[in-house]
Image: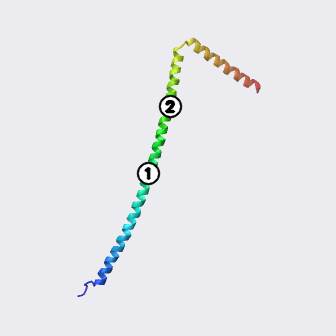
Amino acid sequence: GEGAPTGNYVASGYSVYEEENEQLSEGLRDKVKALKHLSIDIGAEVKHQNNMITEMDSAFDSTGGLLGATMGRLKVLSRGSQARLFCYLLLFALFVFFVLYWVIRLR
């Protein structure tokens, strides 16, 4: 009767759906490939950042050791004779005074 689809029409309808399905699956495949490359790039960047952090950590450790040694020397200096420390400070101040006097005098 009327309104009953013919065999050709039904076959072409399935063909349209199959074609659309192929296009969608191809788009999905492309998106998955892009996500895969993006995740690989992110992994490489994370490894690079971890290496940088490790290098910074070792640099900070060595700097901390140097500062610790300097603080130890300062403690030894402060335990020593206060008179000798005062003498060094006075000699340094006199040296700076004479250098400034000499620079001003040459002008």
User: Measuring 59% from the left and 13% from the top, which residue is drawn there?
Assistant: 84
Image location of residue 51, percent across then percent down = 47, 42
For disc 1, the neighbor class at 10 Å (few under 14, some 14 to 19, many from 20) is few
Above or below residue 25? Residue 86 is above
SS type, badge 1: helix
Colouring mode (rainbow / by chain / secondary structure / one colour): rainbow
- Residue most extreme to the bottom: 1
| Mark 2 surroundings: few (<14), some (14-19) or many (≥20) residues within 10 A | few
- The answer to whether 87 is drawn above or below residue 61 in the figure is above
Cα distance between the residues tagged 1 and 2:
30 Å
Give me the residue at 49% from left, 28% from top: 65
* Residue named by callout 1: 42
Image quadrant occupied by the N terminus: bottom left
**Is 107 placed left or right of 93 in the picture?**
right
Q: What amino acid is found at the position of numbered circle 2 in the picture?
A: Ser
Q: Is residue 29 above or below residue 40?
A: below
Label tally: 2
First along the sequence among labels 1 and 2 = 1
Q: Which residue is mark 2?
A: 62
Q: Residue 56's x, y, as percent? A: 49, 38
Query: In which image quadrant can residue 15 be found?
Result: bottom left
